[in-house]
Image (tube, helix red, strand yellow):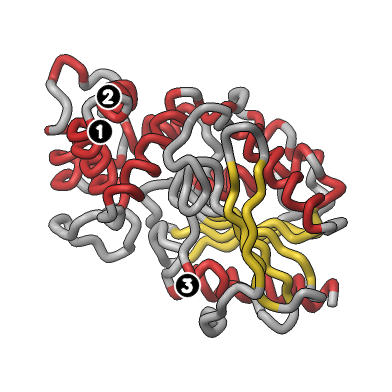
Amino acid sequence: MRELYPEIEPYRTLRLAVDDIHELYVEECGNPQGLPVVFLHGGPGAGLSPYHRRFFDPARYRIVLFDQRGAGKSTPPAELRHNTTWHLVADIEAIREYLGIERWVVFGGSWGSTLALAYAQAHPERALGLVLRGIFLGRPGELRWFNECDGGASWIFPERWARYLAHIPEPERGNMVEAYWRRLDSDDEAVRLAAAMAWGNWEGGSTALVHDPDEPGSFGDPQVAINVARAEAHYFRHAVFLEPGQLLRDIGRIRHIPATIVHGRYDIICPVKSAHDLGQAWPEARLRIVLAGHSAADPAIVDVLVSATDALADRYG
């Protein structure tokens, strides 16, 4: 079974202004002469972690990672003006052009898989290959599944859902995303933070295959919690700025691009049906459903992801 590559530090970091508001944090790791790859983090709003650098052979890859608008070290934090899927797609192109990269591998998980598909469909001539994990297509049913009372996730993690639900008065529970958004957009910092921590406890605690209902969510840092909760609520209440079914509808634009899709069978945040539907629409892609939850750090998922990036390095090396 493949494991993550050893820890690595960037050989270059930079800040790239993409408009009058937003400045992106970008880092490069590995081999400056290697096969370029861009890593697209999840969330929206979650930002980078050091282990994200480790899905790629540093001797063979030029690894480009960046914090998306309002996330991580990009500034301003939690800023949602000029922050849509299509702004992020344009940012990926701006980074590629700034770095002088002609074509690259596109790697994304969870929300990063959504963004990777949107980017590749908008710029198929720039994608050498796709590696996608924890598929999220942004469809209405997917949004309801995890965030609303008529979804299914609450039936699987009822203890954690009860805490998420308790933060919202009963008359507002018909639309939980909007109810949370009103608090996350409050002028009162304490109200914003309390809502963000409740949102993070629900989502951040639901990633693992082996679930402890009393374990705190993974967004314990207040700024991270606010970044993620505000960005996710903003994107979700706008249907992630995609037309209904858009990513499946436009799969013909990228059908020719080598792709690996990996998904945890017991992923509660992004149900496996999304990966199945993507595989049905895109039979040329390699679909692997493994014994795992949502987390990219699950050994079964790491095995497929690292094998996929190695295979692309072999192909283009």
Give the residue pinned by disc 3: 300
Percent x, y of residue 96: 77, 52
Give the residue pinned by disc 1: 192
Q: What residue is rendered at 39% in x and 43% in y?
A: 228
Quick one: 21 or 63, which is closer to the camera? 21
74 shown above or below 4: above
Give the class, few, some or many, for how many residues have Cα within 10 Å of label 1's Cα (few <14, many ≥20): many
Task: Determine the image quadrant of residue 32.
Answer: bottom right
Earlier sequence position, callout 3 versus callout 2: 2
Earlier sequence position, callout 2 versus callout 1: 2
Quick one: 187 or 7, which is closer to the camera? 187
Residue type (three-letter) at the residue carrying disc 1:
Arg
Q: Are marks 2 and 1 in contact (CB under 8 Å)?
A: yes
Residue type (three-letter) at the residue carrying disc 2:
Ser
Earlier sequence position, callout 3 versus callout 1: 1
Q: Are marks 3 and 2 in contact (CB under 8 Å)?
A: no
User: Does 193 sit left or right of 35 as displayed?
Assistant: left
Task: Determine the image quadrant of residue 20.
Answer: top right
Percent x, y of residue 28: 66, 67
Residue type (three-letter) at the residue carrying disc 3:
Ala
Give the residue pinned by disc 2: 186
Q: What residue is rendered at 54% in x and 52% in y?
A: 67
Helix, strand or loop status at disc 2: loop
73 shown above or below 291: above
Give the class, few, some or many, for how many residues have Cα within 10 Å of label 3's Cα (few <14, many ≥20): many
User: Does 76 sit left or right of 181 as displayed?
Assistant: right
311 shown above or below 27: below
Percent x, y of residue 271: 43, 46
Q: Is residue 171 visible?
A: yes
